Image: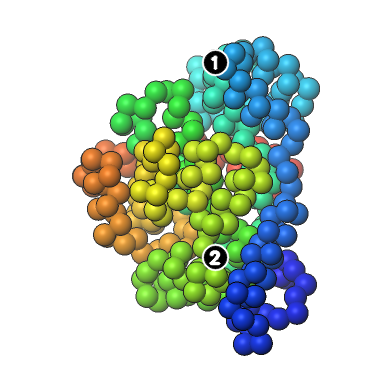
Amino acid sequence: MLCFSHVFPVGDPRVSGMEQQEIIEKRIQDYIGRMPSLSTTVSKVLEICNLPNASANDLNRVISLDPVLTAHVLKLINSAYYALPNQVSSLARAIIMLGLNTVKNLALSTAVVGAIGKKASFSVLPMDSFWGHSICVGVTAKALAAMRGVAVSQREEYFVAGMLHDLGKIPLNVCFAEQYGQALQLAALEQGSLARAEQLFVGLDHGMVGRLMAEKWRLSGSIVEAMSRHHAPEQATDDCRVLVATVALANLYANIYEIGSAGDLFPESAFLFTILDLMGLRWADLWPLAEVVRLEIEKAQVFLHLDDKEAR
């Protein structure tokens, strides 16, 4: 079912190109406007973690008032994803052990998955394959960050950016199910770019829509850039370019090895070499990541199953 009431369908010859574009953008904006906002607790967590003198106690006071988020934090820290030797039952201890930045990204990623991870969000895209792809990009981006010597406290940012990078596809596939299905078919038939096919059949690509979603949720600049620029990392802001390029390379890795699928079935070799050159890497440098990525994908499934009452 489409998410809008409309007078003219997309592509109707009775409306001009400019009018069609305005209709398209309004439908997307209306849909995003109706999407759940991040909870007050998660918004407060993001606010606190952006303060220069924020402490674990500050975060503990906020999260402890939210039993659902508290349960999520404890479930995650005691999962195989973190593989700690001993069970952690104290929220305060969990925050200290994980660090503020990790808890922030953990709260953010689980809140976003909870907001749009339902089956109703997937009219055309296959839900399980989409999340499989997203998880793979997240863990690969984190593994690449580790390989390149990124500080441990910053690596979770790469995971979250990778996991959320393709969210812009969700409003497109819900609001324009027929056109999006055609875009997927064209990209597969031509073995080409899905983003270009999105532009052709819908008038917007998932990077543009991803930026609107990230801005609605007031996500960090690096996440906004990753969601909007992962097909053009050279256009990312200077301070975010390395992270965006890392997510772009992780996305190519997932597509080349066909780990999950979000519709980009045929990575372009020219783009791959551009990203490798931008990061000063060779494709062979990624070969040692294969086993790490495989194991981390299994562990990271916990992000999709925090609420046992909801089937994802």
| Quarter of the view holding residue 301 | top right
Few, some or many residues within 10 Å of mark 2 (<14, 14–19, 20+): many
The residue under the point 31% across, 31% down is 147
x and y percentages locating residue 42 in the rendered image:
69, 32
Front disc: 1 or 2: 2
User: Which x, y percent locates residue 223?
Assistant: 52, 41
What number is the disc on residue 268? none
**Residue in front for this viewpoint, 205 or 308:** 205
The image quadrant that residue 289 belongs to is top left
Give above or below for 206 relative to 236. below
Q: Which residue is more in the foreground, 107 or 71?
A: 107
Question: So how many labels did they put on this image?
Answer: 2
Identify residue for label 2.
Answer: 204
The residue pinned by badge 1 equals 97
Q: Give residue 126's quadrant in the image.
A: bottom right
> In front: 168, or 253?
168
